[in-house]
C-alpha cells in the first residue's frame, strides 16, 4: 500500500502544527514542574564529571529551572540509562525540555506506526486511539520515559524476525526501567535458548555494554553512586500505586522483601506458561500477555509506565472487533483513566492502582472471544520484515 503525496503532505502538516503547539506549550511553562527536570539535572552533573545521583546538587540545579519545594526529583534509572540524560546536559532546561518532548512525540508516532504495520495495516484506523491513551498523555504531561519503553517494545516486535541484532539492541530502551519487565526478560531468555536466537542476545549485550561504557567514561563511580542513592533515597517510604506495594503494606509495610513476592510468583508462572507453548510461541500473541503481567506484578511502577502496554491494549481492541465482541469495556477503562489524567489526579495517589489489572482483564476478555490466529500475527510480521528490508 503506497501513501499518496497528498497524504504525506497532510501528515507532515499535522506533525508541524502539533510540534508548534507542543513547543509553545512547553515554552510557556516551567521545566521544573515536570519529571523531565530530573533527567536534565542528571545530564548537567554528568557532563561536569559530578555525581548524577547527588541529591543536594540536583536540588540546586532544579531550583534554577523552577522546581518548588525542598525535595529533589532524582533520576532513579540505573546508569545504563544515562545516555538519555547526557545530551540534555549541554543545553538549558527550557531548550532541553522542548527537545525531550519532541523525542517523546517521535517515539510515540514511530511506535504506533510499527504496531499498525504489525497488525496488518488495518483500514479501521483504531490505532489512532493511541494518541488518546491515558498513560501516553500522562507521559507527555510529566515528561516521563514511558514512551521510550514503548518504542523499545515496538522495535523488538517489529524487528525480531527481520533484523534480530537491532531488535536486541532496541531492548536497551526497556532496560532504563528493568524492574518493569522481569518476567518478560526471563521468557525472552528462554525463547532465545530454545530458538537459538543468539543474535538478539548479542545485540542486547552490545547495547548494554556500550551504554555502560559511556556512563563510566563520564562518571567512573556511577554504579556505586546509584546503589547508594537507592539505599538512602527513601523510596521505601513512598506510596507507589501498584499491587506489589499494596501487598507489602498488607504483609509488612516496614520491610521491602514482600514487595518482590508478586514478581517472583509471576516470573515462575511466565516461564511455565512459555514452556508449555514454546513450540508455537508468538510474540504478538502470548508475548503480549506476558508483557501486561510483567508490568502488573512489577515491584513498583507509575501510571505513565503503562504506555509500554499500548501494543497489548491495541491488539485486544483488534481481536474484540474481529470476534464482534462489545468494546464498551475498553471505552469505560480508557475513559475513566483519561478523565483522571485530564482532571489532574496525581500519579502518587491510589486512584491509579486499578489501571493495570483493568488492562489485563480487558486483554483476557478480548482474547477469550478470539479463537482464530491472532490478528496480523504472521501477516503483520511478514509485512514488517518486508518493510524493514526496504
Image (cartoon, rainbow, N blue to C red):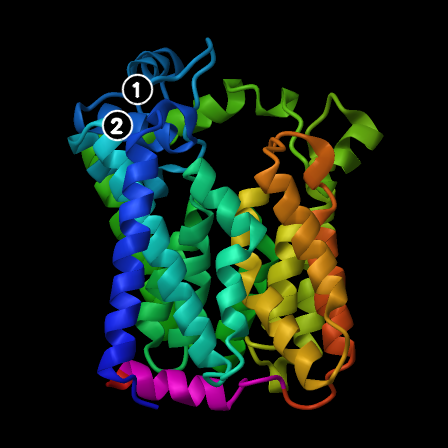
Q: Which residue is mark 2?
A: 93
Q: Which residue is mark 1?
A: 65
Q: Is residue 162 above or below residue 228?
A: below
Query: x and y percent of residue 375 in the render?
Result: 59, 84
Q: Which class describes the residues within 10 Å of circle 1: few (<14), some (14-19), or many (20+)? A: some
Horizontally, is 358 left or right of 66 in the view?
A: right
Which residue is painted at 38% across and 28% down in the image? 38
* Location of residue 45 (image quadrant): top left
Which residue is painted at 76% across and 35% down in the image? 246
Horizontally, is 90 left or right of 377 in the view?
A: left
User: Is residue 175 among what the camera can see?
Assistant: yes
Taking depth in this image into account, of 312 and 207 the one nearest to the observer is 312
Our reading of the magenta stretch's main secondary structure is helix
Which residue is painted at 69% across and 58% down in the image? 359
Query: x and y percent of residue 234 in the render?
Result: 57, 19
* Location of residue 219 (image quadrant): top left
Q: Quadrant of the C terminus?
A: bottom left
Taking depth in this image into account, of 220 and 351 the one nearest to the observer is 351
Rounded to the nearest angstrom, the CA distance separating label 2 from label 1 is 6 Å
Query: x and y percent of residue 15 in the render?
Result: 29, 59
Taking depth in this image into account, of 323 and 71 the one nearest to the observer is 323
User: Is residue 302 among what the camera can see?
Assistant: no
Query: x and y percent of residue 171 in the render?
Result: 40, 59
Label whose residue precedes the other's in the sequence (2 or 1): 1
Q: Is residue 158 above or below residue 247?
A: below
Q: Which mark is residue 239?
A: none
Q: Which class describes the residues within 10 Å of circle 2: few (<14), some (14-19), or many (20+)? A: many
| The stretch drawn in magenta includes residue 255 | no
Horizontally, is 140 left or right of 274 in the view?
A: left
Range of residues picked out in magenta: 374-388
Label 2, secondary structure: give it: helix
Amino acid at each position: 500500500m503506497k501513501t499518496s503525496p497528498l497524504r504525506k503532505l497532510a501528515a507532515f502538516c499535522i506533525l508541524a502544527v502539533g510540534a508548534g503547539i507542543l513547543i509553545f506549550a512547553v515554552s510557556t511553562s516551567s521545566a521544573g514542574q515536570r519529571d523531565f527536570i530530573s533527567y536534565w539535572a542528571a545530564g548537567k552533573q554528568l557532563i561536569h564529571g559530578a555525581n548524577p545521583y547527588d541529591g543536594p546538587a540536583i536540588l540546586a540545579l532544579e531550583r534554577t529551572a523552577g522546581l518548588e519545594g525542598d525535595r529533589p526529583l532524582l533520576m532513579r534509572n540505573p546508569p545504563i540509562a544515562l545516555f538519555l540524560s547526557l545530551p540534555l546536559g549541554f543545553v538549558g532546561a527550557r531548550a532541553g525540555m522542548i527537545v525531550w518532548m519532541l523525542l517523546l512525540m517521535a517515539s510515540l508516532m514511530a511506535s504506533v506506526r510499527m504496531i499498525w504495520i504489525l497488525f496488518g495495516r488495518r483500514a479501521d484506523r483504531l490505532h489512532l486511539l493511541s494518541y488518546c491513551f491515558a498513560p501516553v498523555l500522562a507521559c507527555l504531561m510529566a515528561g516521563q520515559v514511558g514512551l521510550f519503553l514503548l518504542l523499545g517494545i515496538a522495535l523488538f516486535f517489529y524487528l525480531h524476525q527481520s533484523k534480530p541484532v537491532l531488535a536486541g539492541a532496541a531492548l536497551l530502551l526497556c532496560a532504563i526501567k528493568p524492574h518493569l519487565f522481569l518476567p518478560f526478560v526471563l521468557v525472552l531468555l528462554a525463547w532465545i535458548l530454545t530458538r537459538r536466537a543468539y543474535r538478539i542476545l548479542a545485540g542486547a549485550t552490545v547495547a548494554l555494554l556500550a551504554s555502560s561504557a559511556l556512563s563510566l567514561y563520564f562518571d567512573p563511580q556511577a554504579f556505586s553512586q546509584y546503589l547508594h542513592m537507592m539505599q538512602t533515597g527513601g523510596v521505601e517510604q513512598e506510596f507507589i500505586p501498584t499491587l506489589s506495594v499494596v501487598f507489602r503494606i498488607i504483609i509488612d509495610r516496614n520491610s521491602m522483601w514482600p514487595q518482590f513476592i508478586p514478581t517472583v510468583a509471576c516470573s515462575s508462572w511466565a516461564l511455565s506458561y512459555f514452556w508449555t507453548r514454546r513450540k508455537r510461541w508468538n510474540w504478538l500473541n502470548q508475548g503480549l500477555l506476558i508483557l501486561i503481567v510483567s508490568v502488573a506484578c512489577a515491584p513498583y511502577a507509575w501510571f505513565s509506565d503503562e504506555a509500554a502496554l499500548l501494543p497489548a491494549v491495541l491488539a485486544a481492541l483488534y481481536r474484540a472487533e474481529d470476534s464482534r465482541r462489545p468494546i464498551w469495556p475498553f471505552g469505560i477503562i480508557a475513559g475513566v483513566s483519561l478523565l483522571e489524567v485530564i482532571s489532574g489526579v496525581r500519579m502518587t495517589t491510589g486512584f491509579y492502582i486499578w489501571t493495570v489489572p483493568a488492562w489485563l482483564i480487558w486483554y483476557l476478555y478480548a482474547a477469550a472471544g478470539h479463537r482464530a490466529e491472532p490478528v496480523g500475527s504472521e501477516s503483520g510480521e511478514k509485512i514488517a520484515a518486508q518493510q524493514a528490508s526496504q
